[in-house]
Image (spheres, rainbow, N blue to C red):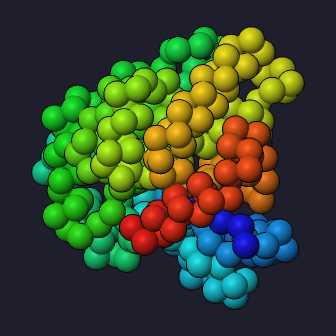
């Protein structure tokens, strides 16, 4: 039985603009059927979507049962105006608007809330993020508002300070988590945060010629070492590919391969523990 705790049904792993355009007028159900069939053939039984504002993930959830797949979606990710995430999510200007979106998504059937609280890795420059991200006090309030509405929270989060703030605020899962330090790792472990490191988004870039190879290798080495340390702390890890991101096709098995290279014989028990915790939350 395989699970993928972070996919984007709306994306195709090749051209994000063309992929989104496929669904802008109306959701392309033939695409969804094709991708769900691929997951079924490979043995996937549980998928968690990172969300989109066109309803692709929501429709995939409607159809997933035909393929023996349990599907979870936040509907649309929520991002602060002027920060990363606007290409795929719904924007808010202030906490009042954010709270309204949380309620709207909950009432429309969201399984959880996804927040975007940091930028992306710059794959050409080790240690660099595309933006610093939100302030800790604001991160705490975002998580608190969603929890008050009875919703688990998935956070797109990179950078030690951002992840530490989110973990201490009780975030349910951290996605990606680049450039962490001991304090951030301990905060996640101590607060029961499930970390979905999406190593595939880095590992699948190797040898593709799109980014500076030395930087990609250093970013992957850093992520791998953090995963190793977090597992040694007893932290909760779950597999998620970020399928649909560039060079990460749907149905990719590279996340399991990368995690096995890090965790060795302990891969299965570590991932089973983290995956169970995640599915109970979401």
Instruction: Residue 8: give x, y in percent of width and height.
Output: 61, 55
Query: Does 163 sit left or right of 144 as displayed?
Result: right
Instruction: Look at 74% across and 50% down and name the residue there.
Output: 265
Quadrant of the drawing holding the N terminus: bottom right
Instruction: Look at 30% across and 71% down and name the residue there.
Output: 106
Instruction: Residue 27: give x, y in percent of width and height.
Output: 61, 69
Q: Is residue 139 above or below residue 120?
A: below
Instruction: Look at 26% across and 50% down and name the residue there.
Output: 170
Asked where in the image residue 228 lies, by quadrant, the reply is: top right
Q: Can residue 127 be seen in this snapshot?
A: yes
> Could you tell me how many numbered marks the image carries?
0
Q: Nearer the viewer, residue 168 or 156?
A: 168
Instruction: Residue 198: give x, y in percent of width and height.
Output: 61, 43
Query: Does 45 sit left or right of 34 as displayed?
Result: left
Q: Is residue 270 above or below residue 104?
A: above
Q: Residue farthest to the left?
A: 96
Instruction: Look at 28% across and 76% down and name the residue there.
Output: 107
Quadrant of the drawing holding the C terminus: bottom left
Q: Residue farthest to the bottom?
A: 66
Q: Can residue 163 be seen in this snapshot?
A: no
Instruction: Residue 181: give x, y in percent of width and height.
Output: 43, 24
């Amino acid at each position: 039985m395989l699970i993928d705790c972070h996919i984007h049904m709306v994306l195709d792993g090749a051209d994000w603009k063309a992929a989104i355009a496929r669904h802008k007028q109306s959701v392309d159900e033939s695409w969804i059927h094709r991708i769900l069939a691929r997951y079924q053939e490979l043995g996937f039984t549980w998928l968690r979507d990172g969300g989109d504002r066109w309803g692709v993930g929501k429709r995939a959830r409607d159809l997933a049962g035909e393929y023996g797949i349990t599907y979870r979606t936040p509907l649309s990710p929520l991002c602060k105006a002027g920060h990363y995430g606007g290409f795929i999510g719904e924007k808010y200007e202030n906490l009042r608007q954010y709270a309204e979106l949380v309620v709207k998504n909950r009432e429309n059937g969201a399984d959880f809330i996804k927040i975007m609280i940091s930028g992306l890795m710059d794959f050409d420059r080790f240690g660099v993020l595309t933006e610093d991200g939100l302030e800790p006090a604001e991160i705490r309030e975002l998580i608190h508002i969603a929890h008050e509405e009875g919703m688990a929270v998935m956070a797109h989060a990179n950078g030690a300070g951002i992840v530490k703030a989110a973990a201490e605020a009780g975030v349910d899962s951290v996605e990606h988590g680049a450039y962490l330090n001991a304090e951030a790792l301990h905060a996640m472990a101590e607060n029961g945060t499930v970390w979905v490191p999406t190593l595939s988004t880095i590992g699948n870039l190797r040898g593709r010629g799109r980014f500076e190879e030395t930087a990609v290798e250093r970013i992957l080495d850093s992520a791998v070492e953090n995963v190793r340390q977090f597992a040694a702390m007893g932290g909760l890890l779950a597999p998620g590919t970020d399928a649909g991101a560039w060079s990460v096709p749907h149905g990719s098995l590279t996340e399991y391969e990368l995690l096995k290279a890090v965790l060795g014989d302990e891969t299965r028990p570590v991932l089973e523990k983290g995956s169970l915790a995640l599915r109970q939350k979401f």
